[in-house]
Image: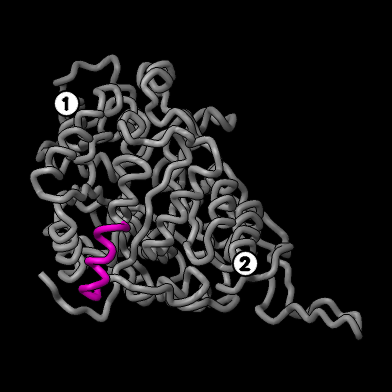
Amino acid sequence: MSITSSRHMTMIGFMQAQNCSTYPGSWRHSAAMQDFMTPEYYQRIARTLEEGKFHLAFFDDRLAMPDIYGNDHRKTIEYGVRAVKMDPTAIMMAMAMATKNLGLGATYSTTYYEPYHVARLFSTLDLMTHGRAAWNVVTSLNDSEAANFGASGHLQHDLRYDRADEFLETVMGHWDSWDDDALVLDKHSGKFADPDKVRRLDHKGRYFSSRGPLTVPRSEQGHPVLIQAGQSGRGKAFASRWGELVFVVYPNLEAAKKQYAEFKQSVALAGRNPDHVKVATAIYTIVAESDEIAQKQKAYIDSLAQPIDSLTLLCEILNTDFSKRDYDEPFTDAEMQSISGWTGFRDRVVMLSGKKNPSVRDFVEFSNRARIKEFPVFAGTAKSVADQLEQWFVERGCDGFVVSPTHIPGSYEDFVRYVVPELQRRDVFRKTYAGSTLRENLGLPIPRAGDWRNQAYAGVNEELLRRPA
């Protein structure tokens, strides 16, 4: 398969600041590195991704160790189920020092940080990376995170997004504090900056009050790229308003084409240009000399998973303890509604199982949580993997891919060594970086101060909210 396209894929490396990748069994792989608590570990990955012309290395994050299963952390520790969680922003800077073009994104919560703090931190990261920073906006989702920050629980799902909307308005307002040409730096006159081009925010809202002005001027790319991954009804509305790079999990190409088209329409309804929002779906890739060898490698990688991996991580994202439930007892309507974590994930299990009231077994089997089948797995030769990627891309199932490694460093190295040249030969993936900033490389416009206020969408679009998850 080879179809010439004027579009080029967006390619993201899916990172974790911890002992494993998104696949908890990855640390058990015989070829996995074990120096994950050193800067060299992340710098090696960064150099590999930059060699492969990846747009971005992106860090997912949680603010607590998975411990909702049985209300205990012992199994998480014993089996290494994402047990280590370092702050990704410091690791980003270590990777930035080893690269020149690779974008670097980190997750930061709107629930447990303040808008001024996030605005200042990511503006600084953006300057120190010469305009390569991105912020993945999350609302946080489980009670373990709440307990770590002195709270008894979370706001209800939709209220978390209401709060997050105001959080973004406050952060964006702070990022508007400085006009692009505010700095003067005239030693002769002694004028450092134009005071008429630096302003206070003076935000007073339902959830936040913040004065300003921000103490950090704007970067080469205006402000950091905004990443979002909301897939519930309310989450999609939030992503449609704010997301510039949107991460999704599409189970197959048919579903991908349908949901991709619907989301792009939602972006248009939000008064934004759909071409300025890149949608990337999470995948695993396994590349080998033959399809037969790739399938054997896939079976080995799949065998690394432990049952406790799935149970621990399901409890974490659903904010529900499965440990005392009968494995095959369906959840009641009330219990399904009480799930307060990742409701989009819950709804996906309902859809895939065809059951309004799934059991624990259904959640394990149909979610494939903590298994490589959780995301589509593209396994085979470089040609066959490239064929699958190209089909999803050309048939408008996505704008690109969030490549999650089955083990580190080999998974990324194989992809860069074998698959990237094949995609480049077909002209569906770039051969060089377009510029020095992440926005240039993503093909996104560099915003001026206040641009976000001028879009037609002002507040939560009611039509989007009425749509089912």
Pick the front one: 168 or 444? 444
Q: Looking at the image, what colour scheme do you see?
A: one colour
Residue holding disc 1: 361
Residue for point 27% across, 66% down? 421
- Location of the N terminus by quadrant is bottom left
Q: In the image shown, does 257 or 328 lie closer to the viewer?
A: 257
- Frontmost residue, 257 versus 95: 95
Determine if the magenta segment contains residue 382: no
In the displayed structure, 427 sits above or below 320; it is below
Q: Secondary structure at mark 2?
A: helix
The chief SS type of the magenta part is helix
Q: Real-space Cα distance between discs 1 and 2?
A: 47 Å
Question: Decide: marks 1, 2 in contact (CB < 8 A)?
Answer: no
* Residue type beneath disc 2: Trp
Query: Residue at the location (37% across, 44% down)?
Result: 409
The residue range painted magenta reads 416-428
Look at the numbered disc 1 and give the secondary structure of its residue.
Answer: helix
Q: Is any part of residue 127 visible from this angle?
A: yes
In the rendered structure, which disc, 1 or 2, sits on the residue that comes first in sequence? 2
- The spot of residue 294 in percent (x, y) is 15, 45
119 horizontally vs 412: left or right: right
- What residue is pinned by disc 2? 175
Residue 237 placement (x, y as % from top left): 36, 60
Kindly give the residue lying farthest to the bottom in the view shown.
Answer: 188
**Residue at 59% over, 45% down:** 113
420 inside magenta stretch = yes
Residue at 36%, 62% (x, y): give it.
52
Label tally:
2
